[in-house]
Image (tube, rainbow, N blue to C red):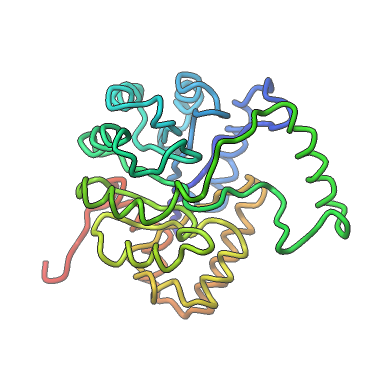
């Protein structure tokens, strides 16, 4: 089983931003290789990552494993900025926490350049997670949740308040972008996220170059089963896999999806598409083959 992971965050110590990240990347590479990930999009730079230059410097050791994907703010990175990132070696983009809706006209030159350069874009969808899932736990009844809550309190004074709105990160914005840039390869994260599944499925249904990743944790995975999202609302060819979790959780994440695929009675071909081929085609590592060829 070969796995293509479209959603790997560049590791860092959130409690000590000064800690050298290179040993963390080394460990992440070991873990990815041990669980069958042979290609992974490393989301690098942006507000809380290393500089784009430092990220590329570290990733040079892992050119066979990691595809550098730049986390950008389209308020700051225009078409010329995308070209500079491409020239550095970045081969995809990631957007999250934008100040205006994803289909804001001022952002279109950024997307136009990505389309021209063949750089897929991964868009976060919906509410941004915060490390403590109140739908399944609470600090009053779980010690680990209480510790997570205390870490969040400690970080409040170290990080600025976020100008973030899920309304700006709707899958419906991807419809605008896909219509305007039909050759741009677009991935929406988290199946669109809670509350957005139907919109996401509708966009995936009709836009040729829009896919959705299945990352987001156990709640979204449960919804994928209960609401028959995989292979029903979303065609198998429209889905890709992403971990989007801590490196020590990747193996467990893979095991959960294997169990899901067993429950869904997916064929070997369907599993291979979800684990590898769909994402490999998006990033040009596999050539699409169509019926009748």
Q: Nearer the viewer, residue 162 or 182?
A: 162
Q: Locate residue 279, reporting x and y percent.
A: 36, 53
Please indicate whether residue 67 sits to the left or right of residue 190 in the image.
left
Residue at left offset 43%, top offset 76%: 266
Please indicate whether residue 115 sits to the left or right of residue 45 in the image.
left
Residue at left offset 31%, top offset 55%: 210
Residue 231 lies, with reference to residue 98, above or below; the image says below
Residue at left offset 83%, top offset 51%: 144
Q: Nearer the viewer, residue 273 or 122?
A: 122
Number of numbered callouts drawn? 0
Instruction: Please identify the quarter of the rendering in which residue 109 is found.
Output: top left
Q: Nearer the viewer, residue 3 or 228?
A: 228
Residue at left offset 39%, top offset 64%: 199
Q: Locate residue 101, reporting x and y percent.
A: 40, 43
Q: Locate residue 50, reporting x and y percent.
A: 54, 24
Residue 182 lies, with reference to residue 151, above or below; the image says below
Instruction: Please identify the quarter of the rendering in which residue 181 is found.
Output: top left
Q: Which quarter of the figure is the N terminus placed in?
A: bottom left
Q: Which quarter of the figure is the C terminus placed in?
A: bottom left
Q: Locate residue 250, reporting x and y percent.
A: 60, 52
Residue 75 lies, with reference to residue 136, above or below; the image says above
């Amino acid at each position: 089983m070969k796995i293509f992971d479209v959603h790997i965050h560049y590791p860092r110590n959130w409690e000590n931003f000064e800690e050298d990240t290179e040993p963390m990347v080394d460990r992440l590479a070991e873990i990815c290789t041990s669980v069958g990930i042979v290609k992974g999009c490393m989301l690098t730079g942006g507000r809380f990552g290393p500089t784009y230059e430092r990220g590329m410097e570290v990733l040079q050791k892992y050119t066979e494993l990691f595809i550098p994907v730049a986390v950008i703010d389209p308020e700051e990175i225009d078409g010329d900025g995308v070209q500079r990132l491409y020239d550095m070696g970045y081969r995809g983009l990631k957007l999250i926490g934008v100040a205006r809706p994803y289909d804001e006209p001022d952002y279109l030159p950024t997307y136009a350049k990505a389309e021209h350069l063949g750089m897929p874009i991964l868009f976060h969808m919906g509410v941004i997670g915060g490390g403590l899932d109140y739908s399944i736990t609470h600090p009053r009844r779980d010690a680990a949740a209480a510790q997570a809550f205390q870490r969040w309190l400690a970080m409040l004074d170290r990080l600025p308040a976020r100008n973030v709105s899920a309304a700006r990160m709707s899958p419906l914005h991807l419809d605008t972008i896909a219509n305007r840039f039909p050759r741009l390869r677009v991935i929406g994260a988290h199946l669109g996220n809670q509350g957005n599944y139907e919109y996401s499925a509708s966009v995936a249904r009709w836009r040729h170059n829009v896919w959705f990743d299945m990352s987001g944790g156990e709640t979204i995975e449960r919804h994928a089963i209960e609401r028959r999202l995989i292979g029903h609302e979303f065609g198998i060819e429209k889905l890709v896999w992403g971990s989007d979790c801590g490196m020590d959780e990747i193996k467990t994440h893979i095991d959960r999806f294997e169990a899901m695929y067993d429950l869904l009675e997916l064929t070997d071909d369907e599993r291979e598409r979800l684990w590898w081929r769909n994402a490999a085609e998006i990033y040009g590592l596999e050539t699409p083959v169509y019926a009748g060829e």
